[in-house]
Amino acid sequence: MRASLAFYNTRDEVDAMVDVVRELAARRI
């Protein structure tokens, strides 16, 4: 994951990161 480049990613890449974050959040529950 290129966290350092998150602010320069395209919307598609940001959406992909959001999907990953949501999956990780779902696993915590």
Image (cartoon, helix red, strand yellow):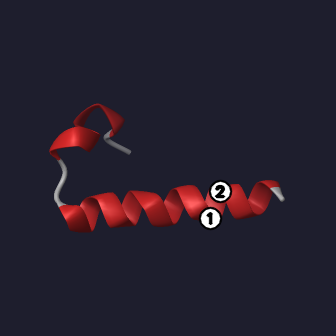
Q: Mark 2 near mark 1, Cβ–Cβ under 8 Å?
A: yes
Q: Position of residue 27 (x, y in %)?
A: 76, 60
Give the residue at x 35% y 37%. Answer: 3
- Residue 18 appears left or right of 15: right
Q: Amino acid at mark 1?
A: Glu
Q: Which mark is residue 24?
A: 2
Give the residue at x 72% y 64%. Answer: 26
Compared with residue 24, is residue 6 higher up or lower down, i.e. above or below? above
Q: CA distance from mark 2 to mark 1?
A: 4 Å
Give the residue at x 79% y 54%. Answer: 28
Q: Position of residue 25 (x, y in %)?
A: 68, 56
Question: Mark 2 packing: few (<14 Cα in 10 Å), some, or many (20+)?
Answer: few
For the C terminus, the image quarter is bottom right
Q: Position of residue 16 (x, y in %)?
A: 37, 65
**Name of the residue lying farthest toward the right:** 29
Q: Which mark is residue 23?
A: 1
Q: Amino acid at mark 2?
A: Leu
- Residue 4 appears left or right of 10: right
